[in-house]
Image: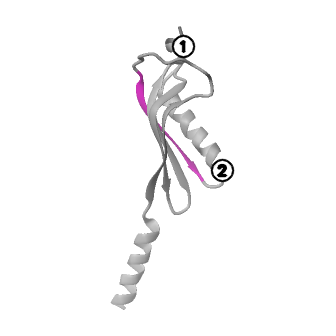
Amino acid sequence: MIFKKTILIALLSLLLTSCSTSLVNFTTLSNKETTITNQVGVRVSGSAKVFLKSKKEAIDEAIENALKSAGEGYDILINGTIKIKMHLFYTEYIVEGTAIKSKDTIK
């Protein structure tokens, strides 16, 4: 009886754990061509929890959430990381980086 409980606890522990893997490091994320000067930004983080979305949609959502957390006008992420965290029923994509305003960097 004790052996069965030990096996059950071990299996439940394995099922409820998660692992995290870095997908990509990036210097700049933007869909517009810009020239970046020395610009101080805001360190931000955004995530997207997905069950059936594609990786691209999830990463786009996480980037958008990170930029929204910086505030109005921030539209570029620099010096960041994209991570994936696997859970039992869903996958979480986490984007961290420094948000800057492109209008402040364009001459």
Q: Residues within 10 Å of mark 2 (few under 14, many from 20)?
A: few
Q: Is residue 49 magenta?
A: yes
Nearer the camera: disc 1 or disc 2:
1
Magenta stretch, residue numbers = 41-50
**Chief secondary structure of the magenta span?**
strand
Residue 50: where, in percent of width, then height? 59, 51
- Upstream in sequence: badge 1 or badge 2: 2
Quadrant where the image shows the N terminus: bottom left
Q: With respect to residue 20, does 8 lie above or below?
A: below
Asked whether, in this view, residue 44 is left or right of residue 55, the answer is: left
Q: Which residue has dot 2 on it?
A: 53
Asked whether, in this view, residue 51 is left or right of residue 77, the answer is: right
Q: Which residue has dot 1 on it?
A: 103
Q: With respect to residue 66, does 73 lie above or below?
A: above
Q: Secondary structure at mark 1?
A: helix
Residue at x 44%, y 60% (from the top left corner): 18
Q: Amino acid at mark 1?
A: Lys
Q: Amino acid at mark 2?
A: Lys
Kindly report the distance in space between the C-alpha atoms of the residues bearing marks 1 and 2.
32 Å
Residue at x 56%, y 57% (from the top left corner): 90
